[in-house]
Structures are given as C-alpha cells and as structure tokens.
Image (cartoon, rainbow, N blue to C red):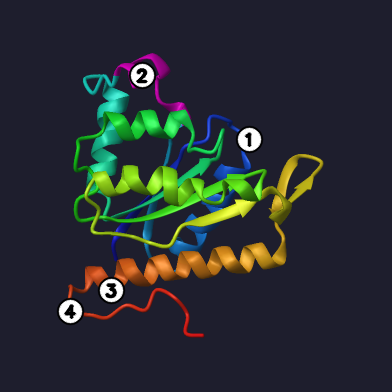
C-alpha cells in the first residue's frame, strides 16, 4: 500500500484543523495505508522562514515529504488563504516536490465565504509543484464541528460522513494510480 503523509499547517497545538486531519488519517489507516504525520508548527520557525534545508529538522521533513506516495494537506483558512505556516513549508520544498504524488487539500474555516480558498488559493500552488493528481478539496465549516469543554469534540454527523466520502475518494485515487495509469477512476458519485 502507498505511504501517505498527513501534513498539518495549523499553527495551533489544539486545533480543529489538526483534528480533522487526524480523522482523515485514521480513515486512511483503516483502509490499510501507512500514514505518517507532520505538524509544520513543530519545525523551527526561524529556519523555516529562511528555508534553511541544512537544518536537520527541515531536511528530515523534506525527506519525509519526498518519500511519501501521497499527501494530505490540512490548513485553517486565514484572510481567505491557507496558513502562512503551510505556505512557508511548501515554499522551502523543491519546485516539483509533488511530482508523481496524489494530494488531498483539506481546510477548516469560520465562514462559508472561505470555501473557495482551497481552489483559488491553494490549488494553484499545488499545481505549480507538478502533482500527479489533486483530489477534490474538502472544506469543514466551523458549524460542522462539535465543541466540548476541552475544545474539539468531533464532527457533526453530516460533516463527518462527507469527510469520509472525500477521504475514500482520495484513497481510491491513490490506490488506482498505484496500480498503474490504465485504470479508470470515478471521482464524483454518479447522479
């Protein structure tokens, strides 16, 4: 099975974005994929901003990214775009760091007006990195997140089901492309 890297672009250690990414990663793991995680916020900030790939932690993160067959990128939406943290990480990677890889963009945000941030903000960045395929983006509105006394308490049932569908479509795409280019993959359910 292909290896999938789940990359959290949230600057917060307690984040709905990271929790949504964890739910997607768990679903992919249940399908038999090897899923590794990378929280960009744990990388040294000054070196990240300088794109210092000589720093051991950044070099390790870049190697982990390069070794993965597929990538799930999760970001909160700030000011109608992906987090600066995620963008800084993508900027330090080689120009075609996504070559041959399948990508699933995920985002969380407080306004439905931010839904297009994935397709108009993040997707062009990803496409410039030459991925094999970019799966259908998935946005989780704050209204689809249940909050408890300790913060994130899960997703509303409808939102959870939609996340499962998006994750499964991504997994099917990853699996089909791993088997070779000849297979036909249906990305959108038939009406």
Which residue matches tag 4? 182
- Main SS, magenta region, reads helix
Q: Earlier in the sequence, mark 1 or mark 3?
A: 1
Separation (CA) of disc 1 from disc 3: 34 Å
User: As rendered, which of 188 and 3 lies closer to the eye?
Assistant: 188
Mark 2 crowd level (few <14, some 14–19, many ≥20, 10 Å Cα): some
Q: Is residue 81 above or below residue 69?
A: above
Q: Is residue 78 above or below residue 30?
A: above
Q: Residue at x 30, y 27 (%)?
A: 58
Which residue matches tag 2? 49
Residue 14, disc: 1
Q: Is residue 42 on the magenta stretch?
A: yes
Mark 3 crowd level (few <14, some 14–19, many ≥20, 10 Å Cα): some
Which residue matches tag 3? 176
Question: From where the camera sits, is residue 22 visible?
Answer: yes
Q: Residue at x 31, y 66 (%)?
A: 174
Side of 18 where 128 appears, left or right: left
Question: From where the camera sits, is residue 6 visible?
Answer: no
Q: Residue at x 55, y 40 (%)?
A: 76
Q: Dot 2: what SS?
A: helix
Q: Disc 2 or disc 1, which is closer to the eye?
A: 2
Q: Is residue 187 above or below residue 119?
A: below
Residue extent of the magenta highlight:
41-50
User: As rendered, which of 6 and 124 lies closer to the eye?
Assistant: 124
Q: Disc 3 or disc 4, which is closer to the eye?
A: 4
Q: Dot 1: what SS?
A: loop
């Amino acid at each position: 099975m292909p290896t999938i890297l789940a990359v959290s672009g949230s600057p917060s250690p307690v984040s709905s974005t990271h929790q949504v990414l964890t739910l997607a990663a768990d679903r992919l793991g249940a399908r038999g994929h090897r899923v590794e995680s990378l929280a960009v916020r744990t990388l040294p900030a000054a070196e990240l901003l300088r794109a210092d790939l000589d720093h051991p932690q950044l070099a390790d993160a870049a190697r982990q990214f390069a070794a993965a067959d597929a990538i799930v990128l999760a970001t909160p939406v700030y000011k109608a775009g992906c987090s600066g943290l995620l963008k800084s990480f993508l900027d330090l990677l080689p120009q075609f760091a996504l070559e041959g890889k399948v990508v699933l963009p995920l985002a969380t945000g407080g306004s439905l007006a931010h839904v297009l941030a994935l397709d108009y903000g993040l997707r062009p960045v990803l496409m410039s990195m030459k991925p094999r395929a970019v799966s259908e983006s998935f946005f989780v509105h704050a209204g689809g997140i249940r909050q408890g006394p300790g913060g994130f308490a899960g997703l509303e049932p409808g939102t959870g089901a939609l996340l499962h569908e998006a994750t499964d479509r991504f997994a099917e795409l990853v699996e089909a492309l791993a088997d070779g280019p000849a297979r036909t993959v249906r990305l959108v359910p038939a009406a």
